[in-house]
Image (spheres, rainbow, N blue to C red):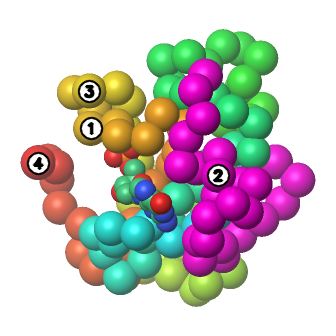
Amino acid sequence: MTDTIFAKIIRREIPADIVYEDDDVLGFRDLNAQAPVHVLFIPKRPLATLDDATPADAELLGKLLLSAAAYARTEGFAKEGYRTVINTNTHGGQTVFHIHVHLLAGRQMHWPPG
Ligand code: DGP
């Protein structure tokens, strides 16, 4: 996997507004926020896309989602609700090839997405 902007954020080589961190996961605000709350949850271990995930990544993928859910509860918007999204490859709209869960909240979400 080639180096990405998110790897540089993990290494603190470029700044980010980090709002969540544990041993395996980093959460930081999206630079191009699409909602009042827009946080990206990424694994500290590189994994490019969901399409690259294997059963060996099952625990890590679970941790990404649980981190987002824990953050939503801690910040007090879990009951109102939120959206979690993983964009994968070109048609999925993925632009940074270090897997990430988008957590969007603070406004009504609509379906279907564009
Ligand atoms: P995606 O399109 O799913 O690959 O989402 C990538 C997101 O990453 C996009 O919403 C914008 C965000 N992003 C890109 N570069 C940076 C950066 O340098 N810092 C932060 N905080 N977010 C970034």
Read off the magenta span.
1-24
Q: Is residue 114 magenta?
A: no
Give amino acid for label 4: Gly
- Residue contact at pointers 1 and 3, CB within 8 angstroms: yes
Is 77 rendered above or below residue 54? below
Pointer 3 local density, CA inside 10 Å: few below 14, some 14–19, many at least 20: few
**Residue at 61% over, 84% down:** 75
**Residue at 48% over, 34% down:** 97
Residue 8 marker: 2
Of labels 4 and 3, the one closer to you: 3
Determine the secondary structure under disc 4.
loop
Ligand 1 near label 2 (Cβ, under 8 Å)?
Answer: yes
Give amino acid for label 3: Thr
What is the distance, in whole Å, between disc 4 and disc 3 at their CAs?
Answer: 14 Å
**Residue at 71% over, 54% down:** 10
Quadrant hosting residue 58: top right
> Relative to the observer, which residue lies in front, 108 or 100?
100
Determine the secondary structure under disc 2.
helix
Mark 4 or mark 3, which has the lower sequence index? Answer: 3
